[in-house]
């Protein structure tokens, strides 16, 4: 190389590699040491109610992935009760181990005092397994074939006892703040446990609002719910991408949802119909990948207002 000695080039290259390595290590340290605990509340207004109706406040929590000993997460979730929501929707992946059930119930205890509904995610049935986290970026994880190893019934019994509506492949109805809400939900599509085709029917026009709930926002479920006329769809699962690139966004959704919709509020179009879709980035991670970057853990307060 003209004007650059071989030794100088090697020194420059080594310095560059060192800086890249240091930057990567710093990002991991930030994501694992700070951002994973930087819980935040997001807020959206959703113009989905009929004209003249008062707003409804819906708190969406998802992907808690509780591990025993996560005291800061537990305290933050409990503080959400101060928001006094009209309705709580939990879209699954609450636990990661058998010992986490009492702790997640303690975290959600103040929220169980409000009307609520829930569906389950894969980590409400199966404990996560060690795996190469890099593969997550280009290949979605696969359904489990091993026997269930988490106390799912203990978790769902606590929710039902509190009065929360279990939407596992079923329909339900809630009366909230004088309004009739019709809801339909599916078991986790990521495990191919969803049975929406058995429930498919047009949304009831008499209801003040019709809501579709799923853990993993797979297109087949969102399309079917939108076709049936459900005005609001609520999902989790994606972790918002979990490891995001500034100005680029999520690198994956771990399902067939477009990366641009990995979190937040969007319009979902199916033919001539459309629904509002909210996807939560969730509050936790797998214990084998305890890091977030440019994607802080979150819960969301959806303020439903007239269209």
Image (tube, grey):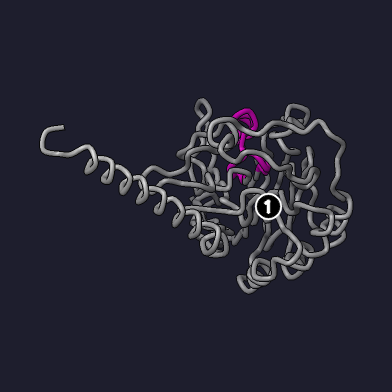
Residue closest to the far left: 3
Residue at image position (60%, 41%) is: 133
Query: Taking 44 as reference, is 103 above or below it?
Result: below
Q: Does 45 sit left or right of 181 as displayed?
A: left
- The residue located at (84%, 48%) in the rendering is 150
x and y percent of residue 278 in the render? 55, 47
- Circle 1 SS class: loop
x then y, percent, for residue 157: 88, 55
Along the viewing direction, whichever of 45 and 90 lies nearer the viewer: 90
Residue 61 in the figure: left or right of residue 106: left
For the question of whether residue 53 can be seen, the reply is: no
Tell me what residue is drawn at x 56 percent, y 53 percent. Answer: 291
Q: Position of residue 286 (x, y in %)?
A: 66, 49
Which residue is denoted by mark 1 in the rendering? Answer: 287
Point out the stretch of residues depicted in magenta.
212-235
User: Is residue 238 at all visible to an observer of this figure?
Assistant: yes
Q: Residue at x 50, y 59 (%)?
A: 29
Quarter of the picture containing the N terminus is top left
> x%, y% of residue 126?
79, 43
Residue 227 highlighted magenta (yes or no): yes
């Amino acid at each position: 190389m003209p004007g650059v000695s071989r030794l100088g080039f090697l020194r420059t290259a080594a310095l560059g590699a060192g800086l890249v390595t240091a930057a990567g290590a710093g990002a991991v340290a930030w994501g694992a040491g700070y951002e994973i605990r930087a819980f935040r509340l997001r807020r959206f207004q959703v113009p989905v109610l009929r004209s003249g109706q008062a707003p409804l406040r819906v708190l969406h929590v998802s992907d808690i992935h509780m591990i025993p000993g996560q005291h800061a997460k537990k305290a933050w979730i409990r503080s959400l009760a101060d928001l006094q929501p009209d309705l709580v929707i939990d879209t699954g992946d609450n636990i990661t181990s058998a010992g986490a059930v009492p702790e997640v119930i303690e975290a959600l205890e103040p929220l169980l005092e409000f009307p609520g509904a829930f569906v389950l995610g894969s980590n409400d049935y199966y404990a996560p397994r060690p795996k190469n986290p890099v593969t997550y970026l280009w290949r979605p994880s696969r359904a489990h074939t091993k026997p269930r190893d988490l106390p799912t019934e203990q978790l769902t019994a606590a929710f039902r006892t509190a009065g929360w509506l279990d939407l596992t492949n079923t329909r339900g109805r809630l009366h909230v703040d004088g309004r009739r809400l019709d809801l339909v939900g599916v078991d986790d599509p990521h495990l191919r446990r969803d049975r929406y085709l058995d429930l498919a029917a047009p949304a009831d026009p008499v209801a003040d609002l019709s809501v579709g709930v799923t853990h993993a926002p797979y297109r087949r479920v969102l399309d079917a719910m939108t076709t049936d006329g459900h005005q609001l769809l609520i999902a989790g699962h994606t972790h918002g991408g979990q490891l995001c690139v500034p100005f680029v966004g999520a690198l994956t959704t771990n399902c067939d949802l477009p990366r641009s919709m990995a979190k937040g509020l969007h319009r979902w179009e199916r033919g001539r119909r459309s629904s509002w879709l909210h996807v939560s980035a969730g509050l936790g991670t797998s214990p084998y990948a305890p890091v977030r970057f440019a994607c802080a853990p979150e819960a969301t307060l959806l303020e439903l207002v007239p269209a």
